[in-house]
Amino acid sequence: AVAVLYTSQIRISHLATGSVSIQNSAQRLSRCGFKGCTQALKGPRCFPAQNQQQNTYHRDHSLVSHAAIFGDGGAYERQNPGEKPEPVENPLDNLSGAQRSSIDVDGVSWSYLRTEGGDESKPTIVCAHGILSSSYTYGDTLKLLQRDGYDAVAFDWPGFGQSSKPSESNFGYKSEDYTKGLKSFVDAIGIKKPFVFITQGYILGQYGILFAAENPDLVEKLVILNTPLGAKSKLPAPLSSYTGMFKNFAFGKNPDAGMYHAAGGPYAFNYTDYQNLQMPYESSEDARLSFETVMKDLNFEQLLSKVSMAAERFRNPTLIPWGTDDKYLALDQVLSWLETKPTSTKLFALPASMGHYPQLDFPEQLIETVTRFINDEDYTKPSNVKGASSDGGGPPADF
């Protein structure tokens, strides 16, 4: 049995610059259930009573930054030597997924997922990932968008995911190379009308904001998921290892992309997700070299300033649905950042517990919020997502 208790969580809806309303909401919590652990965990992706038998990693709550246990096979294999965890059943597995394709753009192969049969009366949605990530993180998100009749695309930036890893002589790996390349990619796959753009994550996700500011005629609405915005934002591990006086010690070693994703949120992490996100770095050194090329000349403080100025220029409707259990980025930094931004930029702290990757943690809740924003509906009204509490928070109904 899973013990259930209640706590209050603040929900914030930044409806205009300088205007913040705060509501308290009850949210269910559940005990982790891992051997010897009494930590409370929140949300829909936890499977706390089953994480010893199923393919879900337990989060070690005593570690700084709440990093999940991985290492040589993770908590499950340490508790059950020689055994492999069983796959976790994804409640969205019964939905048809987007199809993967690739296209050559100026000598660089861009890999992308795209839904089928989109309703032409609805806007196209384009999704961008952050550093060390890929379009894989949007897989369930695209299933839901396909179900709802949207033409939606999630692409892999060059050097990441399944896109090609060109040499620096063929692709510059600077922000301007990425934003210019994205404009050409969008045109190449036949998106001819203004679209909704979703961007998330460190560095590449920030480049997405630069792209929107440079192309307000293309991006009719912007959605910024958890992305470094505030001037005090810091690079988490392993990204921080590639800057500063000791950065040369990090180069030449494969980054742990799976761990990077796992440590950003409040939940135990699915091993299948870990394998898919880590796979590019295990299969070829080209992925590592591409990542290192992005990082080697990075001035993160300068990038934060550049993004802030770009967002001030962008006047189209913008929503920031924020996962408040982000282990890398603090909500209060976003509030400070918003003070100088147009009133068309609004923050909504997602009421369900989500971390750095809302699209992985609870895509059903995220898509409900985003599509309400797209359709000019009240995205702060009570949720219709199965298992959500009256304000949208809480774990699934069958907990």
Image: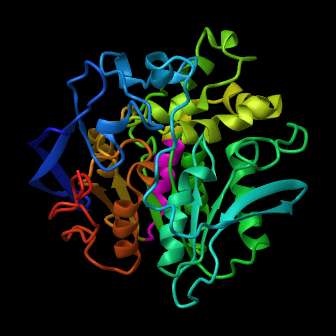
Q: Residue at x 65, y 34 (%)?
A: 278
- Please state the horizontal and vertical placement of residue 26, each as a whole percent of the image: 10, 51
Q: Main secondary structure of the magenta part?
A: helix
Choose between 160 and 234: the one closer to the eye.
160
Q: Is residue 156 left or right of residue 305?
A: right
Q: Is residue 161 left or right of residue 384?
A: right
Choose between 365 and 348: the one closer to the eye.
365
Q: Residue at x 48, y 26 (%)?
A: 236
**Relative height, residue 123 to residue 258 (above, below):** below
Q: What is the residue that sits farthest to the bottom in this orientation?
A: 121
> Is residue 223 located in the magenta-colored stretch of the structure?
no
Location of residue 243 by image quarter: top right
- Please state the horizontal and vertical placement of residue 126, each as a whole percent of the image: 59, 66
> Is residue 309 located in the magenta-colored stretch of the structure?
yes
Choose between 393 and 328: the one closer to the eye.
393
| Total residue callouts | 0
Q: Residue at x 22, y 67 (%)?
A: 380
Q: Is residue 381 left or right of residue 26?
A: right
Q: How is the image coloured?
A: rainbow
Q: Residue at x 54, y 25 (%)?
A: 83
**Relative height, residue 319 to residue 62 (above, below):** below
**Relative height, residue 142 to residue 351 (above, below):** below
- Please state the horizontal and vertical placement of residue 145, each as a whole percent of the image: 50, 72
- Please state the horizontal and vertical placement of residue 377, each as a whole percent of the image: 30, 79
Residue 341 appears in the figure = no
**Relative height, residue 390 to residue 296 (above, below):** below
Location of residue 242 by image quarter: top right
- Give the magenta-colored segment's residue range: 305-316
Which image quarter is the N terminus in?
top left
Residue 291 appears in the figure = yes
